[in-house]
Image: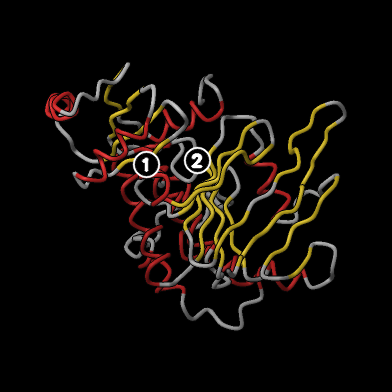
Amino acid sequence: MEYVLETNNLEKKYKDFRALNHTNIHIEKGAIYGLIGKNGAGKTTLIRIVCGLQEPTNGSYIIYGKSNNSNDIISARKRMGAIIETPSIYGEMTARDNLIEQYKLVGMPSLDGIDDLLKLVGLEDTGKKKAKNFSLGMKQRLGIAIALANNPDFLILDEPINGLDPQGIIEIRELILKLNKERRITILISSHYLDELSKIATHYGFLDSGSIIQEITSEELMKKMEHKIILTVNDPKEFVKYFEQNNISYEVMDSKTINVYGKHNLSKLVSGLFKKNLIADDIHEQEETLENYYMNLIGGGNND
């Protein structure tokens, strides 16, 4: 497994406050990794440390095989682009001039590629319009273009759709998918818009109180979130035998709980079980959202 980013028991303390607490994250090459957490969970702190804007109190991290404790981390970071909190743009400049400044800043040998970048983010027709007059969505797309100026392999986006209208959200979503699929850029997205994140992420990391409490692929998560019928029974063995005989997808969760997956008619399932003298103590349907899954994982509270 090739990881673009790994952290090892990363910690960040501010006097008596621990922003990161033994944080372990693993981002595979080619992934769109959704970092999920409430405000104050440590998302931005983690991103700032990985980008070299802050130092960890303890622990370490590795970017493209290079440890933060080695001099090689500088070359590894050159393979990264990032937007942290808000895009860094010059309001009095056009989109093109903003990119020219960024090209100079990162030491690009020529200005070739600026037209392609503007087209990629849908800003090729903005002409002499100053960035301060752009919509919020346009500013966000310009910020992404600036983050792409050095042709990164790894892109970090901190709350990229915060405050955007529905059209702006769709535009950012399509751009992220395009960057991942066509340019093969690995992307880390920090967001609390969980419904939107569920449309693009291939992997998830759930952050709570500075710790990663679960990492999971989208396939694994979808299985956990898909429509299911939950049975509470005294003895799962006979129920399992029935499900096996009838090719019903199931999972024994513990000594008294069985999950049945797929689109099954509840009354027909109960009737079929009853004919075999199989009666559950309790049986009910459940279909989770990503937000519900996260809230259950951390034990409730508000996802602000």
Instruction: Mark 2 and mark 1 in contact? Answer it, CB < 8 Å.
Output: yes
The answer to whether 160 appears left or right of 166 in the picture is right
Q: How many marks?
A: 2
Mark 2 or mark 1, earlier in chain: 2
Q: Is mark 1 on a helix, strand or loop?
A: helix
* Residue that mark 1 sits on: 196
Left-right relation of 218 to 77: left
Residue 276: x and y in percent read: 18, 29
Q: Residue at x 59, y 66 (%)?
A: 101
- Give the residue displayed 57% in from the left and 52% down from the top: 83
Of 130 and 280, nearer the camera is 280
Which of 37 and 47 lies nearest the eye of the viewer? 37
Nearer to me, 240 or 285: 240
In the rendered structure, which amino acid carries the disc numbered 2? Ser
Q: Which quadrant of the structure image shows residue 133?
A: top left
**Type of amino acid at the residue the image marks with label 1:** Glu
Helix, strand or loop under label 2:
strand
In the rendered image, residue 36, in percent from the top left (x then y), is placed at 53, 39
How many C-alpha atoms fall within 10 Å of the one at disc 1: few (<14), some, or many (≥20)? some
Residue drawn where x is 51% and y is 54% of the image = 143
Pointer 2: residues within 10 angstroms few (<14), some, or many (20+)? many
- Relative to 120, is 192 above or below? above
Q: Where is residue 252 in the image (x, y as percent from the top left)?
A: 40, 37
Name the residue carrying label 2: 191
